[in-house]
Structures are given as C-alpha cells and as structure tokens.
Image: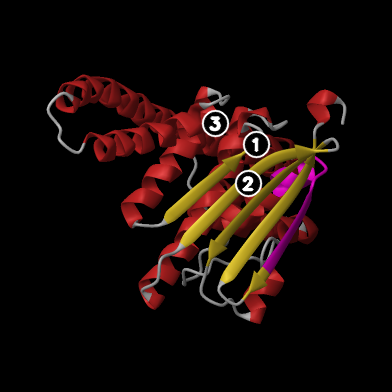
Amino acid sequence: MLIPWIVAIVWTASINSLMMAGLLVPGAIWQLFEFNRKPVPCSWKVITAGMHSSWLLAAILTDSPYITVGLLLQLGALKFMSLRFRSEMDKNKVMIGNYEQQTNLLHELRQQRHDLQKYTAVLQHTENIDTYKNEIRDRYTEIDDLLRGESNVGAGVLFSYHDQARDKGISLDYHIQQAVSGLPLSDYELVSFISNMLTNALEAAEEYQTKTKKQAEIVFHSRKQTGFWIITCKNHTMPLENETIERIYTKRAHTTKGGSHEGIGTQQIMRIVKKHHGVLDFIAAENNFTLKIKIPDMQNGG
C-alpha cells in the first residue's frame, strides 16, 4: 500500500518539487496509521493501490508533480467511504444482536407454551395449589409485561436484558407506561439506545453487588408527558470519581471498566439524543446513578 507513496515522495523530491513531497509525507503516514488502526477489506486495499499507482504514473509520464495531489484526494475519498462502511457494519452488528434477542424471546415463548401443558397437569395433583398458582402467575406476568404493546425489536431488547439481570441475580424492574417501541427512533437507534443504557446499568449494578454483597437494583421508566418521551434509568453503582462524572456522556468519556477502551456506549446514547433534539441529564449520588432523557415526540408533532 505504501509503495506508490514512497515512489511519489522520492520522485517529487528528485525533481525539486519539495512542496508536493512535503504534502505527500503526512499523507503516507496517515494512511499507514489509519489502515493499521482500523483494517479495511482487502479488495479496498487492492483498488486503492491500483488507483494510487495510476495517479503516480500519470504524473511521471506528463512530468507534472502536481498530479500527485490525486493521491491525497483519493485518500480523502477513501476515508469518507470507510466511515460509511464502518457505520453500516456497526448497524449490522446491532441488528444481528437484536435478531438473537428476538430468537431467544421466541424460544422462551415456545418453551412456556410447552410447559403450560405440564403445569395444567400438575395443578390437578398439587396439594398447595394456591402457592403453585402464584408462582405460575408471576412467571407469566413478567414476560407478558414486556411484550404488551412492544414491537418485535422492542420486546427482544427488553427481554434480553431482563434475562441477563435474572441470571446475575440483579433486580431489573420495568415501568413501561408507554411502549419504548413508540420512541421516534429507527430500529437500529432504538436497539443501540436501550442496549447501551441497560448495559451500563447492569455493569455498574453487578460491580456494586459483587463488592458490597448487597442486592443490586435497576429501575427503568418509559413514559410520555406534554409532547415529550421521558426515559429514566436508575441503578446501584459504586461511587464514581469526579473525573469520571465530568467526562461521562462527552467525547472524552472513558469506560469505568479499566484499560484504554473509550466509553463508546455513553457517546452513542448522547449522539442519538442530540440527533433527535433531546436533553440528557444524570445524577450520581453515592451508590445511586440516575439517567434521565427527554426526547420530543416528533412522530406526533409534539
């Protein structure tokens, strides 16, 4: 990939076109860094190398070093295409994850339908029938509350995190006055928005539960009021450092999980909120973190 750049730099320098050589050097360095940092499809590399060589050949044959500026222009176009490509890859990843969530939900529903026949038979022979009936009611009420009024996408993502919380022994309580599927977001945005919010809450709650040995709780609210969607998520957490609080939900956000990983989830939430002209606020008080988001109900002209 760098051969056309090296040849172009050496050639422009040899004919005393130092300005062009100076422009090509940072271009070569940037391309090397970009391709190593975020790999692109092999076919892109082949096509890029071929087009770079064509620009270089045209410059040499016409003895016009300024034609090598085409390498820089092509590099800019490649950057634009790679951003679009990675954006689509991110969307596909989110939707694939949601497909798996919906598949798990469908499996659970089929399992419950199968089990219902067994429960009916057991009821006929159970001495403490009231207790058993209450257990069955509680189990089916949980899944019914998640499905009521939700689209497949909304039900899938809510059920997935309900399941994860149950496996971790964390109390996740949904108060869905208005189905989250009604939010004025695309399916991709809805999955990303809810997933990142609940992932952050689960991670913080799990850490709290592990370190304090106390029951961790998450409460998620969804409602509409005077033309606004109001989404609130409150969870237990270990106390956050002041630096973390100052950076959270900004481009400088970092994960609290350690390492150099960026806080991509919080940035994605903020990006979606801003895109839809919403407002985000949060309160971090000792062992509680509350995230509150207001988004205009644009679908209904609110």
- Cα distance, mark 3 to mark 2? 14 Å
Camera-side residue of 196 and 250: 196
Relative to 235, does residue 101 appear above or below in the rendering?
A: above
Residue 63 percent location from the top left of the image: 74, 41
Q: Which residue is mark 2?
A: 221
- Of all residues, the one furthest to the bottom in this rendering is 242
Part of the protein shown in magenta: 271-283
Front residue of 205/71: it is 205
Mark 2 and 1 residues: CB-CB less than 8 Å, in contact? yes
Amino acid type at mark 2:
His
Q: Please identify the quarter of the rendering in which residue 102 is found.
A: top left
Report the residue at 80% width, 33% height from top. 297
On the question of residue 28 being in view, the answer is no
Which residue is disc 3 drawn over? 154
Say which residue appears at 55% left-offset and 53% top-offset. Answer: 219
User: Position of 19 compared to 286: left or right?
Assistant: right
Q: Position of residue 230 (x, y in %)?
A: 73, 44
Place of residue 218 in the rendered image (x, y in percent of width and height, measured from the top left): 51, 56
Residue at (49, 36) in percent of width and height:
157
Q: Which residue is mark 1?
A: 177
- Lower position in the chain sequence, tag 3 or tag 2: 3
